[in-house]
Structures are given as C-alpha cells and as structure tokens.
Image (cartoon, rainbow, N blue to C red):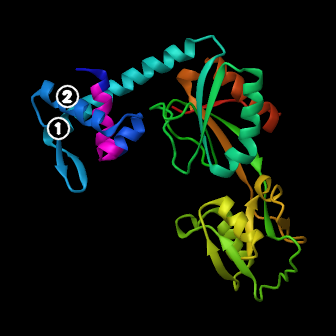
Amino acid sequence: MNWDDVQVFLAIARHGTLGAAGRALKRSQPTMGRRLKALELSLGHTLFQRTSEGFVLTDEGAAVRSHADGMEAQALSFSRQLDGADQQLEGSLRLSTSDWFGLHVLAPLCAAFTNHHPRVTIELLTDARLFSLARREADLVARIVPFDEPDVIQRRLMHVPYALYTQRGADVHQDGANVRLITMDLGFSEMPDAAWLREAFPSARITFRSNNRHVQAVACASGAGLAVLPCPLGDSHPGLQRLEGAKAPPGRDVWLGYHRDLRRLPRLRALVDLFMERLNPSRPDETENH
C-alpha cells in the first residue's frame, strides 16, 4: 500500500471533501481524486460513499481507517525521532498560536531568531484551532489552555496581564449607568475576562461581541464600549487607553508545548530557549505528560 495514498485517504476521511483534504495536504483536488481512485483499485474496495454532503466511509473504508491511523502514527513517530536526532540548526519549524499573541508577542521574537539563524524557516500559524503536535500539524504550540495530550512537553511561557480599555480621550463613568461593553461571543462567554466583565458591570449593556481580540480592540477604539484586552495588545493600540481606577481583570498563563520526540531537535530547542529567555527568565522546568 502506497503511503502517499494512505495520507490522501486519511485527509479525505477527516475533512469530508476532496477540496478541503487537498488544501490540508497542499495538493490539487484532481490529484486527490486520482490518488483515492488508485487506492480503491489496488484494494478492490470502495472506501467512500459519495454524497451531497461529502465523502462518507463505507464499512470497508472504516476498516481501512483503523489500520491507516496506526500506519500514520508509526510514520510520524519515525519522522519525529529522525528530526529529533538532527543536529543541524537549519530547516523549518511550524508554530501555532492565537492571532494577537502571534502578532504582538511571538512575531518579533521569531524575526530576531531568524536573523541569528538564517537557515531556519519559521511558519507562524495564527488560528483558534488547536493544532495536533502528535500529527505534526505544528512543531510548537503556544496557548492559554494547559496541555493534557500524551507525550507532550509543556512549559509555562509567561503570565499575560489583562486590563479594561476605553477609547482614547473618552470620559467614562464607572457607576454602571449607560456603560456599554465589548466582550467575547457566546461561544467563549465563560472565559475569565468575560465573566469578570459581567460581574463588574452587571447593569451595563453589551453592544458588541467578537471572538477576535483585534476586532474587539478596533471596536473599542472606535467608541463602541469598554473592552477587556490583553495588555500587550491594548497598550500597543494608539486609539486605546486603560481605564484609570478600574480593578484589574484576571490575567492568563500561556503554555508552550512540543512533542517529546522533538525535544533534542536543535532548532526547536534554540527557539524555545529564546522564548523562555525573553518572556520568562525564571525558566521553569519542563513538564512531560504521559
């Protein structure tokens, strides 16, 4: 069985369409269709039922899926261990984090790193989706939720303070009367800063919601209301100012994680060391999940 065809099969099974699977593997839709057809011919079975909603596994496809997942796990483990043994400070690193944290915190550090190590290419993905370290969707992930995946080494990267912001030059009365609020969308309404905002201003009116911190900052700077923002973002926006006298909302810890098989990869170690040196000089010990 051709490993490339197995990768195509798994991508279609996970994404449901040839187009989405092709984008994940960076291949064209016709190529995905040809590789799937070749795999089905070689096995003598139809692996997917083609429906108006997308590709659905047949019984034979489900049986192949269980074996294909195992093949992928072995291949990725092999790849990670080879990469982890590579002692050259060159190659690529894929880093995943949220949009505002990538822009305001990590991008300048990544630029400084590549200036010192020009043979290393960093791909910084800013996405709310949690990328898999086991499947090599990312080599390094920074996020506010601690890692509980097996074989992931995690470190507390930094504590991010949050503050209450308003439009620069605005005169805001904090008695709750006529206060307007900008907050997270309903899917993230239980986040600590959103809960704090509701408790601090129980009678205020919510005028704007967004799951994107940059969007919240722009809305706040445009006068839509008060917003709780991470300070690296809020302090850097020229149209915002902290609301003086306001009690500080809760901050968040940011965790850095990578797969244990890559712990000896020189370029990853060098980047992690730079992040820890600049953002958390106390350098806490690594914690490995099992």
Is 69 located above or below residue 261 in the figure? below
Q: Nearer the viewer, residue 239 or 143?
A: 239
**Image side of residue 12 versus residue 258, left or right:** left
Query: Would you identify the image quadrant in which residue 255 lies?
Result: top right
- The residue type indicated by label 1 comes to Leu
For label 1, the SS is loop
Q: In the rendered view, would you say 116 is above or below 15?
A: above
> Is 32 in the magenta?
no
Depth check, front residue: 33 or 143: 33
Determine the residue positioned at 14% across, 37% down: 60
Is residue 49 rendered to the left or right of residue 161?
A: left
- Secondary structure, magenta segment, majority class: helix
Q: Residue 5 falls in which quadrant of the image? A: top left
Q: x%, y% of residue 260? A: 55, 25
Disc 2 and disc 1: Cα gap in Å? 9 Å
Residue 47, numbered label: 1
Is 14 within the magenta?
yes
Q: Which residue is mark 2?
A: 39
Q: Quadrant of residue 180?
A: bottom right
Q: Is residue 20 left or right of residue 273?
A: left
Image coords of residue 155 (percent x, y): 67, 35
| The magenta segment | 5-19
Q: Could you tell me which residue is drawn at 76 percent across and 38 percent down? A: 108
Whether residue 280 is visible = no
Q: Amino acid at mark 2?
A: Leu
Q: Are marks 2 and 1 in contact (CB under 8 Å)?
A: yes
- Label 2 or label 1, whichever lies nearer to me, is 2
Work out whether residue 183 or residue 94 is closer to the camera in this orientation and state it. Answer: 94
- Label for residue 280? none
